[in-house]
Image (cartoon, grey):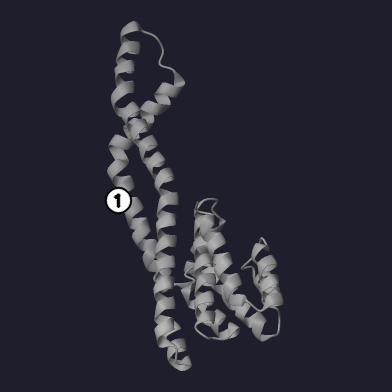
């Protein structure tokens, strides 16, 4: 879309510069997402490793001690031992079932639009992943709109073209509804709220300033940067 806009306006060289800037922004967004996910993933792996070590290596030696002394085994110890035994007996089966579920989910998402919409809604509803996905998608959307506007594309066309960058089905529908609102003559600041793209109404306040000054490109760039700053 950026290249077509540059060809139509005769500013292809400048448009290529904007495209490079846009790719750099996307790379920064991906790196911030990776950094945001690194700590919780590492913490989860360490927790799982410690629990497995406790249930398979440490607790069995305590069972021998309790048996030797004739003391009853505490309930929590029995529960942990049962968990460890379950991991030893069915761990491979659980891993295989989890892998199969992931593959089946990917296939169903590709084949069934309704299933994809349902899973995307579930992702957005989750407390951590939902925040990451929503922030990344919205940042990508607004940054693309800003680049298209700077390439000489009108607001409505820029918004419509940027919808294609939104991968989450729920947010994609909200972005498309925003474009339909613009076509009906609704102000952009109101359209993003009505469509559900800006449920917190944070973008709307900034967009109203853009509407007052006519600087939609700068406003969208600032919104995209604010979204990225949420990653730290």
Q: Nearer the viewer, residue 73 or 22?
A: 22
Question: Which residue is painted at 57% across and 76% down in the image?
Answer: 217
The answer, for residue 203, to whether it is visible in the render is yes
Question: Where 179 sits versus 169, above or below?
Answer: below
Q: Is residue 223 left or right of residue 207?
A: left
Q: Nearer the viewer, residue 227 or 81?
A: 227
Q: Which residue sits furthest top? A: 69
Question: Where 194 sits versus 45, above or below?
Answer: below
Mark 1 crowd level (few <14, some 14–19, many ≥20, 10 Å Cα): few
Question: Which residue is painted at 70% across and 84% down in the image?
Answer: 185
Q: Is residue 198 left or right of residue 25?
A: right
Question: Which residue is painted at 42% across and 27% down in the image?
Answer: 79
Q: Secondary structure at mark 1?
A: helix
Indicate the quadrant where residue 55 lies.
top left
Indicate the quadrant where residue 92 lies.
top left
Q: Is residue 24 left or right of residue 196?
A: left
Q: Position of residue 68 (x, y in %)?
A: 30, 8
Question: Where 45 sits versus 155, above or below?
Answer: above
The answer, for residue 118, to whether it is visible in the render is no
Question: Which residue is painted at 37% across and 67% down in the image?
Answer: 107
Q: How many marks?
A: 1
Q: Position of residue 21 (x, y in %)?
A: 42, 71
Q: Position of residue 59 (x, y in %)?
A: 34, 22
Q: Position of residue 220 (x, y in %)?
A: 58, 71
Which residue is label 1 attached to?
A: 96
């Amino acid at each position: 879309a950026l290249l077509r806009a540059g060809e139509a306006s005769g500013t292809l060289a400048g448009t290529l510069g904007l495209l490079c800037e846009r790719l750099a922004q996307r790379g920064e967004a991906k790196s911030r997402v990776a950094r945001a996910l690194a700590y919780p993933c590492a913490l989860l792996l360490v927790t799982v490793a410690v629990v497995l070590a406790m249930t398979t290596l440490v607790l069995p030696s305590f069972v021998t001690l309790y048996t030797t002394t004739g003391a009853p085994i505490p309930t929590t110890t029995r529960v942990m031992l049962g968990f460890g035994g379950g991991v030893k007996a069915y761990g491979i089966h659980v891993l295989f079932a989890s892998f199969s579920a992931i593959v089946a989910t990917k296939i169903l998402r590709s084949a069934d639009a309704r299933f994809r919409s349902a899973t995307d809604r579930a992702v957005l509803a989750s407390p951590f992943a939902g925040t990451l996905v929503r922030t990344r998608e919205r940042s990508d959307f607004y940054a693309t709109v800003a680049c298209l506007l700077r390439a000489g594309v009108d607001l409505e066309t820029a918004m419509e073209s940027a919808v294609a960058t939104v991968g989450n089905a729920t947010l994609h529908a909200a972005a498309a509804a925003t474009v339909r609102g613009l076509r009906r003559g609704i102000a952009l600041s109101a359209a993003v709220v009505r469509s559900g793209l800006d449920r917190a109404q944070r973008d709307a306040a900034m967009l109203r300033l853009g509407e007052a000054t006519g600087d939609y490109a700068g406003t969208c760039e600032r919104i995209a940067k604010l979204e990225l700053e949420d990653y730290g």
